[in-house]
Image (tube, rainbow, N blue to C red):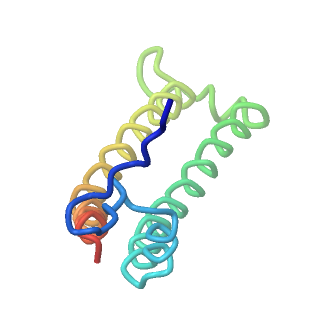
Amino acid sequence: MTTQAAAQPPGGVEPRPAGPTAEDFERVQQSPEFAELRRSHRSFAFPLTVAFIAWYLLYVLLSNYAGGFMGTKLFGNINVALVLGLAQFATTFLIAWLYARHAATGLDPKAAAIKARMEAGE
């Protein structure tokens, strides 16, 4: 029984791997374009995250320690606590919408350009 060695491709050139290599990813990660993409994401996401957590903690602290204020009726049976609680939901949806808009206009085009250069082997 004999074994055959893998056939050499025509022209004697080794085929390029199907996708980017680990070295390609490391090179892109060190590029100024990737640093700009990362900075753009962080400069949007981190401040909004901190602001939302502070807003949520304010709501929790007011609920625990300012019961009189939170129980203040605004109109009918609607009090400050209910309005601020519903504002938490509104804030969540607003932040999600703002991030989607930021990603579509600022992040996705930069990421697509980086991806295209990587796939082209540049």
The furthest residue to the front: 1
Q: Residue at x 41, y 85 (%)?
A: 32
In the image, 34 versus 27, the foreground residue is 27
- The answer to whether residue 39 is above or below residue 1 is below
Give me the residue at 28% from left, 68% from top.
12
Question: What is the x, y in percent for residue 106?
Answer: 27, 66
User: Residue 63 sits in which quadrant?
Assistant: top right
Q: Position of residue 93 (x, y in %)?
A: 37, 37
For residue 95, say whether it is visible.
yes
- As drawn, which residue projects farthest toward the bottom? 32
Q: Is residue 113 visible?
A: no
Quarter of the figure with the C terminus = bottom left
Indicate the position of residue 5 as horizontal and vertical percent values: 43, 48
Relative to residue 53, is residue 108 depicted above or below?
A: below
Looking at the image, which residue sits at the far top? 77
In the rendered image, residue 64, in percent from the top left (x then y), is placed at 77, 32
> In the rendered image of this protein, does residue 12 appear above or below residue 103?
below
* Quadrant housing residue 59: top right
Whether 61 is drawn above or below 31: the answer is: above
Question: Which residue is found at the position 29% from the left and 63% from the top?
Answer: 115
Front one among 37 and 31: 31
| Total residue callouts | 0
Residue drawn at 50 percent across, 66 percent down: 42
Of the pair 63 and 79, the residue shown nearer to us: 63
